[in-house]
Image (tube, rainbow, N blue to C red):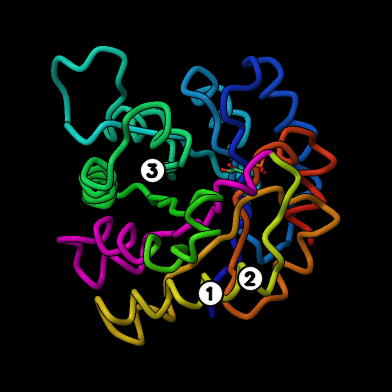
Amino acid sequence: MRKPIIAGNWKMHKTVAEGVAFINAVKNEIVGTDVEALVCAPFTLLPSLVEAAKGTGVKIGAQNMHFEDKGAFTGEVSADMLLDIGVTHVIIGHSERRQYFAETDETVNKKVIKALAKGLVPILCCGETLEQREAGETKALCKVQIEKAFEGISAEDATKVVVAYEPIWAIGTGKTASSQDANDVISYIREVLEGIYSDEVSEEVRIQYGGSVKPSNVEEIMNESDIDGALVGGASLEPTDFVKLVNF
Ligand code: 13P
């Protein structure tokens, strides 16, 4: 059985005080659930959030990391630095990083390899633009992104990766892929994983959907057979919404 995982991606939002207040507001509402709840916050908030979330059902993740251990990489943060402060998860290859910060399939692959080697759970993002969707290229594009991201990763490590399928046209737009469409692409991603590894691996990897998920549509999305979670931007910023998302 794949454990559902609902993750908030706060992107570039919230101060430390706001982040800690959020954790304090949600922590008593997220108890005794079979759902893994995660908040991925900006670097400056992470130590305080880890502290605030200790002993609660909420885990804390980062939104990016570098693939080198250390060195002259101004402005970057390593996997060891994240582990040092108690972070457990890291988003890798979000479309906003691919679009605005020159993230490529190659750097995504290096980061996934490094995260796994260090014991961080990578949340690996893939997904197509509107243009690519309209050209019927969604599956071919996701195949390439997934095959490149998993290059050189063992079957055992592959099962630890969380994949997030996020169609770019559905991010922050209020437009959601229909739950059937999302499930169709996610089933296909499972087929791609089966092709690289095996049926067992493809059945074990958790795959989230992301793109305008909110309390009103989360249940329908989570009811789909191949969707194991959601990666949520805007609707993860309000404590009451986040609680509803986790307790879908
Ligand atoms: P929205 O939920 O705001 O559409 O953002 C989705 C996303 O990019 C999560 O990583």
Q: Earlier in the sequence, mark 2 or mark 1?
A: 1
Residue 163 on the magenta segment = yes
Q: Earlier in the sequence, mark 3 or mark 1?
A: 1
Q: CA distance from mark 3 to mark 1?
A: 23 Å
Residue 194 percent location from the top left of the image: 33, 81
> Which disc, if any, is residue 93?
3
Near-viewer residue (175 or 183): 175
Secondary-structure class at tag 3: loop
Question: Quadrant of the image for the C terminus?
Answer: bottom right
Secondary-structure class at tag 1: loop
Q: Name the residue beneath numbered marker 1.
A: 2
Q: Residue furthest bottom?
A: 199
Residue 156 percent location from the top left of the image: 25, 71
The amino acid type of the residue labelled 2 equals: Asp
Near-viewer residue (1 or 149): 149
Quick check: 31 left or right of 136? right
Quick check: 18 left or right of 107? right
**Range of magenta residues:** 143-172
Residue shown at 56%/22% (left/top)? Answer: 48
The amino acid type of the residue labelled 1 equals: Arg
Q: Name the residue beneath numbered marker 2.
A: 181
Ligand 1 located in image quadrant: top right
